[in-house]
Each structure stands twice: as C-alpha cells, then as structure tokens.
Image (tube, rainbow, N blue to C red):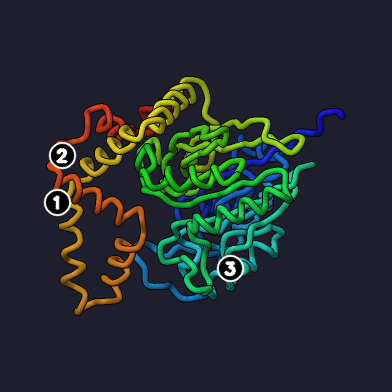
Amino acid sequence: MGKGRTSRVTVASDWGPRGRAYEPHLLARPEGIHGDLLPLLRESDLNMVNVESVLGDAGAPIAKEGPNLRGDEGAVRSLVAVPFHVACLANNHAMDYGPQGLAHTLSVLQGAGLQTVGAGLAWEQVAQPLVVTAGDARVGIIDCAESEEARSREGDPGVYGLEVPEIERQVAALKREVDLVLVIFHGGREYIPVPPPYVIHDLRRIADAGADAVVAHHPHVPQGIEIHNDVPIAYSLGNFVWWQESSCFYQRAGYLFHLDVADGQVEGFSLSPYLLQHDGLALMQGQVRETFLQDLARVSEVLEDTEDVLAVWDAFIDYNGGTETYWQSVIPHIEGLTDDPTRHVPWLLNRLTTPAHHKLYVRSLRRLLEDQASAPEWARALVTRWRTRQFCEAVD
C-alpha cells in the first residue's frame, strides 16, 4: 500500500482583540495582521488558536484577580480570513463576563464557522473532546487549563480544568477512533523561561497516556520543547495576536507549532518563529531567528534534568524578590478582607487554588525552612535574559 497524503495541523497560541494596539488592525485588515505567516497558515489542513477573550458586549464582569477582557466581536473576521478552524477556549479569560459572556462568545465563534472546544455552558460541553478532520487524518482534541476563576466546578458553565486522571481516560478512548490525539493546555507560570515542575509532571503523564502531542500556552513567553517517550511536548508557544505593552523581546516573540500526520501517525513536527510588531506579525529571519532557536534549544535542555528545572524555578523566585516579597504581598489582602471582600477575596482565592501561584508560595517557604542559598548563577542569568532582553536590541 502506498504512503497516504501528509496532513498538517498547526497550533497557535493566545489571540484576543484586547482594545490595545491590535484591535484596530484586526477590524480594519483581518488578513493583514498575520503578515507573512498567512501563507504558512493557509498551507495547513487544520489551524487551531486559543481565543483568550470574551467577544461582544454580553454579560457583566466577574470578581477576579486580574483584568476582565473582552473585544469587538467583529474581530472574528480575522480568524475566518486565515482561516482558523478550531477555537480553543480553555483559558483564564473565557468566563470574564460570566455565563452570558461565554454563551455569546460561543455563538459568535460558531456562527462564523469555527468549531469550539474546552468550554461550555454544561459539563457535557465543557469536558467533551472535539473530533475533526485534517486532510486525510482524524484528529481528536482535548483542551484544558488551570483556568483560575474560569474553571467549571460541579458542572457549572466554564472551562475544562486540568483534570489529569479524566484526561488520561479520554486520551485512551480517543486513541481507538482517531489518527492523532492532541492535548492543548493553558497554564503554568507567566514570564518564566522553563515551566514549573508540576507542569512538566502533569503534561508528561498525559503524554504517557497515549497523546500524540501536547502543546501549551499562557506564560506569554516562549518555553522549550521536549520529546518525552517519543511524544513532543511544547511547553509554551509565547504570544500570538496578543499585544502587551512591553519592550521585552520574549513577550514579543512566539512560534507556530506544526504537526505532520500520515498513515495514522505523526511524521514529525516543526516550528515557525515570528515577531509581534506594532502593526502585526512577521516571521523571524536571519540572525534574529538563529539566536531565538539557540535560546529555545538552551531552555529545552534544562527540561532534561529535574534539578535544573528547580534551579530555574528558584531563580524566578529570587528575581521577583524572594520569599519575603511574596508573602508581604499577601498581608494587604488579608487586612482588607472585612472592608472590601469583593476586591481581596478573589485575589486570595486565586493564590490559594491556582497551582501556578500556590506552588510558588510553598516552594518559597520550603527554601526558607531548608535555608537554601540563592539559585545558581546560570539559572539567574537565564531568567534575567528572559525578563530583560530588549526587543530593539534583539531585532536591530
């Protein structure tokens, strides 16, 4: 039997018309925002993107730590123009305007022809994997997130949490009916070059359950890639159409993740690194691309050693002021509980229930108890580079 046609699946990360630099471009030139990434996306059989914003004016803002995000629903034309085929909604902003906001966002996306996964108004919809075609391949998609206040609890409207045992069962079931099982995860700690240990542990478990690839986003900076028991795990793609007012290179750099599938199995994967310019996206070229790939290889190497991962986690704590700084930030919220609970309770709940926060607090205390020294110099240098390397210096 001859070799079947190769099908390409492309995953993009965070997208949102956030009322900042990109929203006018999304509305005025739906195709143009993607720059020279557009031909690459149009060559792909299946394009997926994380829609990290409520679309339209429905609903009221929920009480939460962090901003409530929504954008003009007309921006969906930019997704259609590519086209993107699947909108992933398991993230920490899908419920920013409550069930009404989520319901309207689902209606806008589905009305524009996109399929959705990772969020819903009832548990069956929240947790349901999506099965789609990519050329000749059948693809099963599970979309999950740490999700903070957006998480569905007890079947309420919301997004699918990182329910590892349930996801393991779903992966095993999907393996019997599709050619490719792809798990998308939104979570981890923001602005760190290497994922926290718990993220690595959980995503490796999902890979071992039979997923063919695991792809993650949320940190707003790129992180590395590993091949775990023949399964590629991309820990963070960085930002996509998600503008941040930052001069930091890594907040304005990302990569598309491509999977090629033939005869029911993954042939390989590839990356398309790009820059976030003020007027849209542009593929990296020349020395900028070469240096970026070298940096990505360096942080990928760290994933091979648990102690090295912990060293970067500790360096991140040190960079942000250490144990004392983290715990001092808690005091005003405890003191303000009686006077202004609507402000302080969401902050504390988020810190207590979201692993990206509470595991950091626990690690900082454990280091203090064990009288550990500062993180090694190489780890501190890596964190500093990810936080301070300037876009203008890297690109000029």
Quadrant where the N terminus lies?
top right
Most extreme residue toward the bottom is: 338
Q: Which numbered disc, 2 or 3, marks the residue that appears first in the sequence?
A: 3
Q: On the picture, is 250 further left or further right than 11?
A: left
Q: On the picture, is 232 further left or further right than 252?
A: right
Residue name at image x 31 percent, y 55 percent: 357
Above or below, 112 relative to 225: below
- Mark count: 3
Identity, as a three-letter code, of the amino acid under mark 2: Gln
Asked whether the residues under the numbered discs 3 and 1 touch, taking CB atoms below 8 Å apart as contact, a structural biologist would say no
Q: Circle 2 is placed at which residue position?
A: 372
Q: Circle 3 is placed at which residue position?
A: 120
Above or below, 282 relative to 158: above
Identity, as a three-letter code, of the amino acid under mark 1: Glu
Above or below, 59 relative to 79: below
Closer to us: 240 or 352: 352
Label 1: few (<14), some (14–19) or many (≥20) C-alpha neighbours in 10 Å: few
Q: Circle 1 is placed at which residue position?
A: 324
Q: Is mark 3 on a helix, strand or loop?
A: strand
The alpha-carbon separation of the residues under discs 1 and 2 comes to: 14 Å
Residue name at image x 75 percent, y 43 percent: 137
Q: Which numbered disc, 1 or 2, marks the residue that appears first in the sequence?
A: 1
